[in-house]
Structure formats: C-alpha cells, structure tokens
C-alpha cells in the first residue's frame, strides 16, 4: 500500500514540468478562446521566441505521450502542413489553424 503510494507520488513528481493529455484535451472541450490558444501556444513555444519549431513540437507531443510526435521528421511534416509562409516555423496565426484542424 505504502509502496504503491510512493511510486504514484514519484511518477507525479517526474511530471511536474509536463502536463497530461487529459488536461490538454480539457482545454478544448469547448470552443477555445483566443486566450486559451495563446496559452497553449506558449506551452509549445518553449524558448518564447514567438514561433514553434519542430524540436519544440516534438518535446510537447512526446510529453503528451503521442508516439507520432516523438519522430522529429514527423513533426517537421506537421509543421510543413500548416506553415503558410514557408519559414519552417509555426507562428500564432498558423497555430490557430493547426488547433482548429487537429483538435476541434
Ligand atoms: Ca520557439
Ligand atoms: Ca510559418
């Protein structure tokens, strides 16, 4: 009993800097507001330069436990699909479309 409690607490500690897929999905149970999209964008944009690159996308999708997101090549492809201006990065405008397509 105590051991299983401990291992649960350890698992939760290890995820302090992450967030769960449930939390992520919960964001989109209702029509996401611009504020929510902005907050989600900030989660993806690890270095806060205003763009999401393939590495950042990979980090977040991996922490969500999405296998396809753990392949850098796959992340590049996802970005390419929404990268309207062809700079290889997702900006906030492109991210809105990304969210609408993937999550709504
Ligand atoms: Ca960035
Ligand atoms: Ca772009």
Image: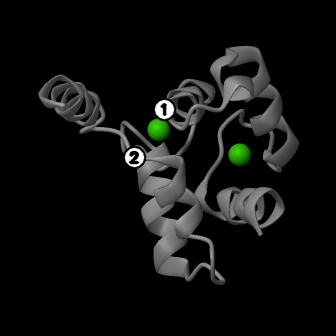
Q: Earlier in the sequence, mark 1 or mark 2?
A: 2
Q: Is residue 17 above or below residue 6?
A: below
Residue at the disc numbered 2: 19
SS state under label 1: helix
- Quarter of the view holding residue 31: bottom right
Counting other residues with Cα less than 10 Å from the Cα at mark 1, is it few (<14), some (14-19), or many (20 or more)?
A: some
Q: Along the line of sight, which residue is nearer the eye, 44 or 27?
A: 27
Q: Position of residue 87 (x, y in %)?
A: 72, 36
Q: Seen in the image, is 27 located left or right of residue 87?
A: left
Report the Cα–Cα distance between label 1 and label 2: 7 Å
Residue at mark 1 = 63
Disc 2, SS: loop
Residue 77's x, y, as percent?
Answer: 83, 28
x then y, percent, for residue 38: 48, 67
Compare residues 64 and 99 and report the one nearer the observer. Answer: 64
Q: Residue at x 70, y 16 (%)?
A: 71
From this viewpoint, which residue is outermost toward the front?
Answer: 1
Q: Is residue 78 left or right of residue 13?
A: right
Residue plotted at (65% across, 32% down): 66
Residue depicted at x 45% and y 44%: 45
Quarter of the picture holding the N terminus:
top left
Quadrant occupied by the C terminus: bottom right
Is 19 above or below relative to 62? below
Q: Are marks 1 and 2 in contact (CB under 8 Å)?
A: yes
**Left or right: where does residue 71 sit relative to residue 57?**
right
Q: Nearer the viewer, residue 97 or 23?
A: 23
Residue 20 place in picture, x, y as percent? 45, 47
Q: Is mark 1 within 8 Å of ligand 1?
A: no
The image quadrant that residue 14 belongs to is: top left
């Amino acid at each position: 009993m105590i051991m299983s409690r401990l291992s649960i607490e350890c698992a939760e500690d290890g995820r302090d800097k992450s967030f769960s897929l449930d939390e992520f999905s919960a964001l989109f149970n209702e029509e996401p507001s611009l504020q929510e999209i902005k907050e989600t964008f900030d989660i993806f944009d690890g270095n806060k330069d205003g763009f999401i690159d393939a590495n950042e996308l990979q980090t977040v999708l991996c922490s969500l436990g999405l296998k396809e997101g753990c392949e850098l090549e796959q992340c590049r492809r996802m970005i390419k699909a929404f990268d309207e201006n062809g700079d290889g990065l997702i900006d906030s405008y492109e991210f809105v479309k990304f969210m609408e397509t993937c999550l709504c």
